[in-house]
Image (cartoon, grey):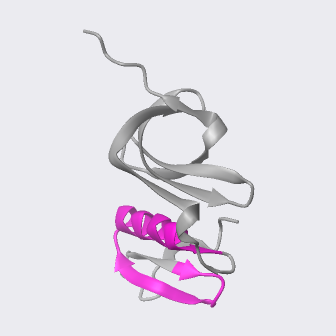
Amino acid sequence: MLGRFTVRPSNDGDGTYGVWDGAVNGWRSQGLSAEAAEHAKTELDVQFDAHGPRSADAVRRVNPAQPVEHAEWEPGELDIWIRDGDQWLGRVRDRDGRLAWVPAVDLRPAAQDTT
């Protein structure tokens, strides 16, 4: 189950962000930009599930990252898979650099540019 880690504004009031770990009720990191905090959050999602370390057979890195389309067939780049319960989720970076976990059924390889 994803959701153990969340990005929140840091406690120091300096306009930075951090990653909160709901399982231990504490900060994993602080003092980050919003983009860096989102990336740190997804890296922690790769390493841990709700119960502890994620097993190695539940993670598949995609190297190099592959172009994909998701949901309304928006372009993005897939760089890793994780198994969460009974489904596989792909971490996709959109054209603005935002990261999201997308169910495998909602992803397809991007159309090749033939121009």
Q: Nearer the viewer, residue 25 or 88?
A: 88
Expressed as whole percent of the image width and height from the top left, the position of residue 42 reads 48, 64
**In this picture, which residue range is highlighted in magenta?**
20-49
Instruction: Using the image, determine if residue 2 lies above or below residue 8.
Output: above
Residue at the far right in the pictured view: 86
Residue 41 falls within the magenta-colored stretch: yes
Residue at the spot 65% in from the left edge and 68% down from the top edge: 3
Q: Is residue 95 visible?
A: no
Q: Nearer the viewer, residue 14 or 44?
A: 44
- Which quarter shows the N terminus? bottom right
Instruction: Using the image, determine if residue 60 lies above or below residue 112.
Output: below
Instruction: Using the image, determine if residue 88 lies above or below residue 32.
Output: above
19 displayed left or right of 6? left
Expressed as whole percent of the image width and height from the top left, the position of residue 97 reads 36, 48
Instruction: Using the image, determine if residue 60 lies above or below residue 75.
Output: below
Residue 63 falls within the magenta-colored stretch: no
Q: Nearer the viewer, residue 28 or 103?
A: 103
Q: Is residue 98 visible?
A: yes
Q: Nearer the viewer, residue 73 or 90?
A: 90
